[in-house]
Structure formats: C-alpha cells, structure tokens
C-alpha cells in the first residue's frame, strides 16, 4: 500500500493542511477586529482553543467516529483508529489512496477545528470561557463528527449521492445554523440595539479575511486530495467565486447605502468562499462567478434581515456561512458539469442531483440546529453559558483572561 | 463663561451628543479617559478569588458655554447619561476667563 | 497530454499561487501602515479590490488576450480561453507542460492582481474608489495584459530574446513607472510638503513586508513552473537578494541619517525582492548578493531624489518597484550565467543579452508610462480621479467607505 | 544525480522552507506584542535582521562550515560550498538525496535565522542595534554553525547516535540557554521589578503565535526531507503536541491564577511546538499529547521560577525554548518507537538512547552557554551592549531607529 | 497663573510647537481629542445622500503660564494655527491657583 | 472644591494610585498625554548627531476634591511620583465651582 503513495499528492495535501490550519486563527482575527476592544482577546482565544480542543479530540477518538467503519449510515467506528495507533503507516484506500493515512487525518482535523471556530460568532462578547470549552467538545463530538461521517465517511448522505466537495454542508451549514441556534438561546449582548457597537479594528478583520482567502485554497483545492487537474479547477473556482462575492456584496451595499464598506467587501469575499466550497470540484469558472456574485448579494441581504429582526448573531456566521453554505450546496446541484467532474446539475437537466442537494442541506440544518439547541440548554443548566453582567460590562478580556489587549 | 466637564460612559456619548444638539449645544471636545469613582470600579468574582477592575474606560466631554447655559447643559447630560448604576459619571463646572476663536482671533469673555 | 502532468510540479505551482495571492493583501498592509490612520482602510481595500477585479477580468478575457495565440507579437487571443472554457482539462504545452492549464492560469492571475495593487502607492489618501475601479480594469486590460503577452506570451520581446524570469519588466517596471505617471498627473496630497505625514502603524508595514517576502518565494521560485533545481536556485537567490537589499538600504540610511529606520530595512528588502525577480532563475547566489545590495542602496537614493523633487508618489512604488525593477532587468543582462540556466550576461562577455535587456526595459517603461497617462486623463475627465477637498481632509475611510479603522 | 530528484519531495521542501522563513518575522510579532509600545519596532526589526544577516552569512560561508566535510567531528568545511558555488546543480546525497542541494541549503538557512531571532528575547527593550548585529554574526558562526554540524552535519553527536529530528537541541536548547546567558550578563531593564511592564499589543502576539504554529509544520514535517509517511507523522505530532501544550499551560495557569491568560495559551502552544521538535519523527501521536502537556505545564512553572528569581530574561526564550527543548530532547529518548522510525526509547527498554539524549542536551547547553558568555563580554567591551539610560527610557524605537510605531 | 487650553488641527501641532519655542514657551502638555465646532463638523456628499462627519480629530495643547505671558501665547497660537477655514479651533483661558513641581515639590503661585 | 491636575510619569501611575487610595482618595480620572517641560525633553546622541525627543508620554491624573484635601493629595503625589530626575511632572490646582453626580443629579459645591 505504501508503494502507492505519491510524493506530489502528499506535498500538496500537507501544504493544504497547513493552509487550513492558519484559517482558524485567521478567523479569530476576522472576528476579533469586529468586536469591541474589550473583547478582542476573548474572540481570538476562542478560535485558538477551538483548534486546540479539536486537535486533541480528533486524535483520541474524533477521527475514529467520523471516518471509522460505517455503522448503519449514522456514525463510524474503528477501534484501531483510536489514538491513531493503527494509522501510522499506509494510506486509507477508501478516502485518499495516494497519500499517507495521517496526512488525511490531519487535513480532516483542520476542518473540524475551524467549524467550531465559526460558531463563536454567536458567542461574541458574552460567554464564559469554560462554557465554550465544554460546549466545544460536545458539539464537535455530537454534531460535527456525525455530519462529517454522513457526508464524507460513507454515511447515509454519501450513499444517497449528495455532493459536498469541501464542506459546504458539513462545515458551513452546520456551523452557521448552529450559530443561529446559539444566538437565539443565549440572547443579545447587553446594550445590543440600544447603542452602537463599533468594530474596534477593521484592518485586523481585513488581515483575517486575507488569511481566510489564502488558507481556503488548501480547504478547497486540497479537497481534491491529489495534486492535479481537479485541484487546479477547485483552486480557480475558489478564487473566482471569492472575487465575485466581494464584488457582489460591495455593489449591493454601495447601491443601498451609498458607500461600500470594507467590511462588506471582506464579508462578500468570505460569502463567495463559503458558497463555492461544496461546488469547487464540480463546476466551471464561469459558474463560479455566478455562485460568488449571488452569494455576496444574498448574504448581504440576509444580514440586513437578521439585523432588522434584532437577532444578535453577532458576527454573522449564520448569514454568511449558514445561508452562503446553503446556497452553495444548492448551487452545486444546479451548476455541476461533467466537463469538470462526473456529475451534472439542474442546468444540464439533472433534477435528481438538485433534489439530493436540498435533502442533504435540509437534513444537516435540522440535525445541527436541533442538537445545538439541546447542547446549549445542557451547558447553560450546568456550567452556565453567559458571564455575569459586570463581567460583560468590563469585557471578557479582563473577566475571562485577566488581560487587556492594548496598553 | 464656564467649562462643563462631564465624564460619562462611552456608550452614552452618542445619546448625549444628540440630546445636546437638540438643545442647540453643538460645539464640544471629547477625550477618551479612564476613571474610577468612590466605589473603586467593579469587583469581579472568579474561582481563584476576586479582582478589582478600576480605571474603566470613560469619555470626557468638555463644553465651554455662557454662564446662562450651564444649567441646561448639565441637566441634559444628567438626564441622558444616567443609567442609575454606579459608574454613571460626574460633571465639573470650571470657570473660564475668556475664549478665543483661532480662525478669526476674536475674543469672547 | 494529461499523462504528462506531474503531481510534484502541480503541488509546487498551486502552493506558489496561494503564496502570490497572499502578497496582494500583504501589500495592502505594507502600504496601509504607512498612510495616516484616516486612510488605512482605503489603502487595504484598494489592494483587495485589485485582486477581486483582476480575478474576474482574467477569467473572462484577461488570460485569453495575454496568453492566447499571438497576433503580430502585439497581443494574444484564443476564443477558447474566454471564460477558461477550453482550459478545464490538459496542460499548456507552450507554457507549462507538466502542470494543469488552470494551475498556470491561476498562477499568472496573481501576478496581474498584485501589479495593479502596486500602483495604488501613487493614489494613496486621495482618489475616489470608483475611479480606482475603472482605472484598474482599463489598466490591467490595456497595459498589463499586452506587456505580459510581449514578455511571456510569445510576443515580440520574448521573440527578441529578452529575459524576465518572474516579472521584473511586466510587473515591477510597469507598475512602478505607471505609479510615477499617476502621481505626476493627479498631484500631491493636500498638505504634502507643508506638514509631516507620519506612517500610522509601522508594525503593520513590517507585517506586510513579512508577507511579501514569504509570498515572493511563490512568485520567483514558482516561476520555474516545475519543482526542481531551477526552482531551488530561484528560491535561494530570492532570499539572498532580499537580505542583501535590506542590509544595503539599512547601511545607506544609517550612514546618511545616523539611524536606520525599520521602514528602510523593510523597503530595502522589497527592493531586493524586486531586483532579483527578473534574474532569479538566471544568476547565482553570489550575484544575488550584489543585485540585492545595489538595489537597496539605489532605491534608497531614488527615494531621496523623489522627495527632493517634491513628487508625491506617496509610497514609493516608482523608487522601489520601478527603478528596482529596472536595475533587476539590467542586472539579469549582466550576471546571467550558464552555470544556472542557458543564458549568459555581460560579465561573461555577452553584450547582446545586456542590450536586449535594456531594450525590453525601456520599451516597457515607455509603453506603460504613455498608456497610463492617457488612462488617467480619461478617468479624470469622466469619473474624476480625486476626491473633494473635505473628503480628503476627513480621510478616505470615512468618505469612501463610511468606516473608521480603529475605535 | 539529478535524475533522482523528486518533484514531490522538492515541492514539499520548498513550501516548508517558505513556511519556516515566515516564522522569523512571526516571532518578531510574537515578541513585539509583549514589549512596551516604545520598543515594538526594535523587537520586530531585530528578528528581520536576524533573517537578513544569517541569510548572507549562510550563503557566503555558514553552510560550508555547518554542513561541509566533517573535521574531527567538531566542525565542517568544504571549499566548494563557499558562496554555494559548487551546489548549483545536483543533490546532497548524504543529507537529502531526493531534493536539489540548494533546496536543502535554503531549508537549513531558515533554521539558523530563527535561532538567532529567539535569543532577542533576552535583549528586549535594552540593547544597541549595532551590538545585536555584531553579536548575531559571531553567535551564528561560533555557536549555531558548530552545533548544527555536531547534530546534523555528521559531527560527533550525530556519530554518537543522538536524535534530534528538527532541532530541539540545535535550535531551541542552544537559543534558550544562550538567552539565559545574555540576560544574566546584560542585566535587567530599567525599572524591572519596580513597576509593571505590560504587553502593549496582545493580539499581535497571538498573530505571531499563529504564524509560528503555521510555519512550524514546515519546520518539523519539512525535516523529513521527503513528502511521505514520515512527514505526515511529524505533521500530526506537531499539531497534537502544540494543542496539548496550549491546554497544559492554560489549565496550569487557570488553577494557579484563577484565570487563564491568552498569553499563556499562546506560550503553551509554543512550548508544545518546541518540545515536539526533536521528537516529531520518532514518536506516535499519543506520546505527542503527553510531550505537549508536560511541556505546557513545565515551561509555565519554569517561567514562574524565573520571575521569582528576578531574572529579566524578558520574553522567556529560556523557559519556553530552553527548558521546553531540553524536555523534548529527553522525551525523544523516552518515547521514540520503532512503530514510527528506526529508534526506540526508554519506555521500550532502550536506556542507551535515553542516555545519549541527555549527553547531547547537556553538551549543547554547556557549549552554547559558555560561548555566549564569552561573546557577550567581547561585544560589551567593544561595541557596548546596552543603550544609554535615556535611550532606554525613551525607547529603542526612537533611539535606535528614529521611529514611532503608532501615530 | 493661567492655563491656556488650545484646541487646534493636529497637522498644525509641529508649527505651533516651534513658534512657541521661538518665543521661549517650551513646557506644554498635549492630548489627542476629537471635537466639533458650531458648524457641526464637515458635510460630505455622496451618491446615496449626505453624511455629517463630526468629532474630527483635534489636538489639545495645555500650557500653564504667568498671567503676563498669556497674551503672547494666545497670539502665537492664533497666528500659527490659523488656516482661515472652519475647524481651526478654540483657545480657552482658565485660572490656575498654583502649580507644584513634582521633582522638587516647590510651589509657584 | 479644586481640581488637582497632576502630570506624571506613566510608570508611576500604579504607585500614585495606591498611595492615594491608602489616604482615602479613590475617585480620579486618568488621561494619556504627551508633554515636555522647560528642559525640552531628552537629548539623544548618536553617530549622525543629536536628536531631541520631546513630547514624551505622560499620564494626567485629575482629582476633584474639597479644598481641605488639596494639600494631602498634592503631597501624596509629590512624594510618590518623584524620582528626582527631569521629567517628573507638574501639578496644577484649578478652581471648580461645583460638581454634579450623574447617577443621582445631586450637586456639590
Ligand atoms: N472626584 C473625582 N475626581 C475626578 N474624577 C472623578 C471624580 N469622581 C468621579 N470621577 C470620574 O467619574 C467617573 C464616574 O464616577 P463614578 O463615581 O463611578 O460615578 P458614580 O458616582 O455614579 O458611581 C469616574 O470613572 C471618574 O472618571
Ligand atoms: N464651545 C466649545 N466647547 C468646547 N470645545 C469647543 C468649543 N468650540 C470649539 N471647540 C473645539 O474646537 C474645535 C474647533 O472648533 P471650530 O468651531 O471647528 O473652529 P472654528 O470656529 O474656527 O470653525 C472643535 O472641534 C472643538 O474641539
Ligand atoms: N507649564 C506647563 N504647562 C503645561 N504642562 C506642563 C508645564 N510644565 C510641565 N508640564 C507637563 O509636565 C510634564 C513634566 O514636566 P517637566 O518639566 O519635565 O518636569 P520637571 O520640571 O520635573 O523636569 C511635561 O512633560 C508636561 O506634560
């Protein structure tokens, strides 16, 4: 089996894994710039911790249940995957035959980590560090790992034939709708809607966006699991949709508000990245322009809707990742073309794939939302989710970390 | 002429600005400061003990007005910036002998 | 054709493309730290937009005219390259036979993007966002794409035999001298020369410089288009010249001013990077030291000259990229050695190559400068290039984006 | 020889080299955020200069003495390596047979650069730029190059059989204990212990930590020098130990201080990275959890000890890199397993390897410490190490660079 | 003794500092503030409408001097900081009862 | 009532705060400022010449107290903030006519 390992594919997958790893702290900066200066450390630290917690969970048992032997399409389990002890040599023929098993494990790990990071959007500026840690372990184990199994680990959605190239469903829909659940349950920040809460450091958010865009090449083009034509197509699609997303949000907000904010350009880029994620290896570059443009405009309007409804899903994981991922999952069923991969979508007359995509998206939304609701309630009853009012007032940096960001 | 020096919660600045504006008080100078009152900031409880957070962020508004307007300014600030909780702030009235407009050099007493 | 694709070469080219992508926002930070805090968002946003605009332009028709079938050495065109529809599979034998066509397209795209980004130096703190966007599309189409064709797309300079390993002419000379043209035409910032305009965040600039240095390995070593000896030489040369450039500028400014500023160290590093760009795959590491050192000292003095002349080419794209690129193009004709590649330069007695390099550099300067002048005038007459005085006074972040960077 | 070069391995080694390069400015940010705002430029600039100086030294003669032909196990020398003139083509069969020689040279260069960067911890906020430059050239030549030769260049420690996968001894022990020597000799910062010196920008430090974590994948997984199973194991181990280190320090400080600071999480991550460095290619992921956890807890306590002793080794290179590296070197002798590589450690009954590791670590400590003491004394007597009191008071940014970081 | 409190454009600080210096006024304290005058900042026009930018960045210079020097200080500031456009700033004269030098503890009245 | 306005070295803030606290003076407002005294900052020597570093970072503490407490406050600050070197700072005593508590609206004279 070792004989089949390709150095080129491995080189690309390892580089991709490093790129995806950088996305999680990148997300921390993206989010951190948008909160008030009294909470920036808390925001970045939660992303670091998402990476740290999931890294350990994944090695010990996360990979074993997400990618182990399928049990009724629901969950996986392979005892020899616990602690990765049985994966030190050789490759995983049913996942990525040309790269070492551990390269695949590491690559998948980074997806699990950032997914948890995305949800912190809904916890911004108000949750206990301890609650986040407990919630994080539970959520990754009970929401992420099963979903990853369903879609990529030979679970029921994979068997059904739903397509998700790099995680539109598993990563973005799941985290986005979970963030919505969290926001609805734990409630608004003190003063939300009463006075404005300005982003404290927009260049930090733009830097975070740059690192996300950069790392996302690993996310999407790495998901080809080989270094060849498919990776190259996914790469071009990723960049194209991102650019179109940035332009879409920019023009939409320019028209509506008279001026295009840089946060809109950055959010549009992320919306484009999210939307192309499930589609990257199935569509062509011209479709990517459409997917990105629509994502930018759509997510902008969903954000306006969220604000109008007074929902404090503070950093718009739901608007951008949730609905952007939903659009991407559906768009995959619309634009998939056999010129790129072996699947075709609605515009080529394949209604079946389109329906499958909707089934996959909806079941992920329901599963993620419902289980998140339960987990939030459990954590809230036990650890307590929110900090005390004075702690929120002085900020989480001081109250949770005993630190002041800038001095 | 007097300088009204109000130290208030940063999150109340917008409201205070608007309230003053509606009463015709436009000109002002704003400084970011940190402060603590008699009750010494906020006490946080945590597993390892407690922690005093003093020198919380505040905003200082300085408004130089004719003596006749001082009361109106103070009342407006008090009614807008108040939350009723510790840390709402203080207003100090300081005498100003004269004021000069840089653009024109004209002096007001 | 697919059979010839090398996973190793593709892995390196995709990684390189990601690296080069990061340079454009990196440049935004490099520039953004040097402007006043009221314009930092504008500066970074223009770089993001350079990437976004060029990404879409390139996919739709930019690549087709830069790298399509040559028409009289002047411009290219291949209908099947429009929208990249004919490039989904296979490789481009006349450009990069061992990697997928789209990998080559993506790699080249990133060069076009950053080139537009560099020019924003001359627009710092004073231009309308809309003007930049219109100018950007025109400039990329009418200046960059033809130049790329001349030098790399089998156009007349390539046929002549001019050498440009990674874009000294196409990227740096073109953007640097275009920036000079822009600065001369749109004029100084309000207050320039009257009071000092301090960089508002030097660590941001140093971070930007770090990302540029990092990304430039993709730029230069990626330009080998294969992962082997040539890429490795280009890599070492890049790093060596950068280090020498940083030291050159540092010592020159230390001697002259008594203290070496960190911005000088950073600018010297960029000068070294620029100068080695055309030479990276043609010279040996010891020559790289000379090329970098000279670049650092030269660009420092050109900057002093620019300041003395009262030209507000604000962030020195001309001094660093323009004259650094010019020196690099000439240096390639001086130091090229057959110990590294198939060409030799002046010090090995090859006057011909030296002359060719000068021809290529000069024609690029003239073309870029003249066309830029025309484009600036057109944009100024139609959209209007500069913001109103009050908008400039309050800063572009508020006036163009409705945002405040830090709060 | 050229025939054996693997594009895949080269792709990975070049990508790794770029990753490691980014660590040095990343370290500058990591350190820069922890000093006062009047010294941030100085801190970052020293790291940039470490990279610049070492880059030139390495090309001219550093590589030749570290990796040239062994002379009595003490030092190397190969005349044809001077200026890298004999290394332009082919590969180095005794080091990395499947990649071009220059790729190996560049990779090793980046290790030398960051090692010098680490020592600046002990110079924070108080040394002359000129003294640092002189010290840096001497230290790299007289401490780093010999140590690299001993351990990796077929010197006596390599012949003895000591294991150091990616530089626990050469990089971390050497720099950490040298930093301790520097701190003891040049003394405390003015006011140290009298009033608190708060970190001026914690998000900057967290960004630096993110770049270190990211770049370290190149450091450790790149040290496999091939893109295959060994690199993948090193990759997973690196990430796992880092996560465990972050959690270890976090929980230890949470217990002790009641709140876990983000700087602790970040420092713990670095401690984990340091400790796994020598072990990454020899142990399994479960051992990595132990190695990381212990590193986080240990380094935290060493830091507390250092503070209690009133030693101003300002940014804890000794506590984190020195003792973390020491623990890692020993841990390699404990946990090495033939399931991963050809060596086994103490827990598999191999006392010999364990003893070898201790010998290697101790001799490196003694050598680095003693030579650093001598060098510090020489530089102090000649150039003078510390700035004048007023210069320290106004800060090094103004006094050494004539710049103000933020305005 | 009086405190001259001048709020000026940040870009004029260097000039004002030098002008004062040349008249022997060295000591001063500078604070970054934001402010708006009676005309309520600057109005920007754009496609979508207009936007008031108030609370523009200003610099506050505080100089405590003997009564005799107040006029000179004010004149110097006015003549140096003036551009003639809205936003040039204001100077307020505030009484100071005494001043103590921390280094020595000596008191001046 | 008086406002004690002390401009001190930033590194002395903690000490001064504690010393005042131990004398029952808790409330205060702190502003980050830059300043120079009569001796015009600090002169640095380097290879290329010399350089004046003026406008060094300082901290301004404002404390409004009853007239009776002014002396105690001043003495405490002087004795804690002093290092004996140039740059230790200044304290100004400024009259305050009245003070209003925002939380309650109550006025003190
Ligand atoms: N005596 C004082 N001198 C100077 N500043 C004061 C004084 N009292 C209050 N302040 C300022 O006012 C702010 C709010 O005061 P605080 O006492 O917290 O209000 P409250 O009395 O409503 O609790 C403080 O943070 C401080 O900046
Ligand atoms: N009455 C006032 N009270 C406090 N600050 C004032 C007052 N009037 C002006 N200022 C300060 O002076 C600055 C400049 O004043 P402005 O009215 O814009 O000058 P001009 O009258 O020349 O237009 C303002 O931004 C504000 O900070
Ligand atoms: N006349 C003054 N007006 C305003 N601020 C002053 C004045 N004199 C001193 N200061 C402030 O006090 C600070 C310290 O003063 P300085 O003269 O350096 O102290 P010392 O007299 O002990 O050397 C200065 O940086 C400045 O901010």
Image (cartoon, coloured by chain):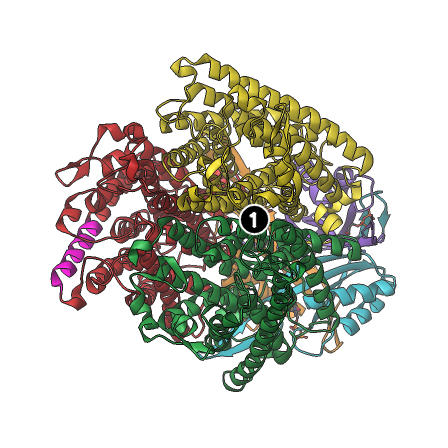
Chain colours: A yellow, B purple, C red, D green, E orange, F cyan
**Magenta includes A186?**
no
Q: Position of residue D376 (x, y in %)?
A: 55, 81
* Residue at 65%, 57% in the rendered image: D291
* Residue at 51%, 51% in the rendered image: C37
Question: Which chain is disc 1 placed on?
Answer: D
**Magenta includes C351?**
yes
Q: Quadrant of ligand 3?
A: bottom right
Most extreme residue toward the bottom is D381
In depth, the one of D197 and C371 nearer the eye is: D197
Q: Which residue is mark 1?
A: D236
Q: Main secondary structure of the magenta part?
A: helix
> Which quadrant, please, contains the C terminus of chain A?
bottom right
Q: Quadrant of residue D90?
A: bottom left
Q: Is residue F10 left or right of residue E41?
A: right
Q: Which residues are magenta?
A: C350-366
Q: Is residue C13 left or right of residue C143?
A: right
Q: Position of residue A96 (x, y in %)?
A: 48, 36
């Amino acid at each position: 089996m070792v004989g089949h390992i390709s150095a080129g594919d491995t080189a690309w997958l390892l580089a991709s894994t490093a790129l995806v790893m950088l996305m999680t702290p990148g997300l921390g900066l993206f989010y951190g710039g948008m909160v008030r200066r009294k909470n920036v450390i808390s925001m970045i630290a939660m992303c670091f911790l998402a990476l740290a917690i999931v890294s350990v969970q994944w090695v010990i048992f996360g990979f074993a249940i997400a990618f182990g032997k399928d049990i009724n399409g629901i969950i996986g389990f392979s005892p020899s995957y616990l602690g990765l002890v049985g994966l030190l040599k050789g490759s995983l023929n049913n996942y990525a035959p040309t790269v070492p098993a551990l390269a695949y494990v590491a690559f998948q790990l980074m997806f699990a980590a950032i997914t948890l990071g995305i949800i912190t959007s809904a916890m911004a500026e108000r949750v206990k560090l301890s609650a986040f840690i407990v919630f994080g372990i539970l959520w990754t184990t009970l929401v992420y790992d099963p979903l990853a199994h369903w879609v990529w680990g030979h679970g029921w959605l994979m068997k059904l034939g739903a397509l998700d190239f790099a995680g539109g469903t598993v990563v973005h829909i799941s985290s986005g709708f979970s963030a919505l659940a969290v926001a609805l349950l734990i409630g608004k920040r003190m003063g939300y809607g009463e006075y404005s809460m300005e982003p404290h450091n927009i260049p930090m958010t733009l830097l975070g966006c740059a690192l996300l865009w950069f790392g996302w090449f690993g996310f999407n083009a790495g998901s080809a699991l080989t270094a060849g034509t498919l990776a190259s197509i996914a790469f071009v699609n990723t960049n194209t949709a991102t650019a179109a997303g940035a332009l879409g949000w920019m023009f939409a907000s320019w028209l509506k508000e008279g001026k295009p904010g840089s946060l809109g350009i950055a959010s549009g880029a992320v919306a484009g990245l999210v939307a192309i994620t499930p589609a990257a290896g199935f569509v062509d570059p011209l479709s990517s322009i459409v997917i990105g443009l629509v994502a930018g405009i759509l997510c902008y309007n969903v954000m306006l809707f969220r604000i109008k409804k007074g929902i404090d899903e503070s950093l718009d994981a739901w608007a951008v990742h949730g609905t952007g991922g939903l659009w991407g999952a559906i768009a995959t069923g619309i634009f998939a073309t056999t010129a790129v991969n072996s699947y075709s979508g609605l515009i080529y007359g394949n209604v079946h794939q389109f329906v499958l995509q909707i089934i996959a998206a909806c079941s992920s939304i329901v599963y993620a939302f419902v289980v998140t609701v339960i987990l939030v309630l459990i954590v809230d009853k036990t650890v307590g989710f929110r900090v005390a009012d004075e702690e929120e007032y002085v900020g989480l940096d001081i109250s949770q970390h005993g630190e002041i960001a800038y001095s | 002429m007097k300088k009204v020096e109000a130290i208030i919660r940063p999150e109340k600045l917008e409201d205070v600005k608007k309230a003053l504006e509606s009463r015709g008080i436009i000109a002002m100078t704003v400084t970011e400061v940190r402060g603590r009152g008699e009750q010494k900031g906020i006490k946080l409880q945590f597993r390892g003990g407690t922690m005093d957070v003093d020198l919380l962020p505040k905003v200082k508004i300085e408004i130089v007005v004719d003596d006749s307007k001082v009361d109106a300014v103070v009342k407006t600030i008090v009614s807008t910036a108040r939350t009723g909780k510790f840390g709402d702030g203080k207003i100090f009235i300081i005498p100003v002998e004269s004021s000069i407009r840089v653009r024109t050099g004209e002096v007001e007493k």
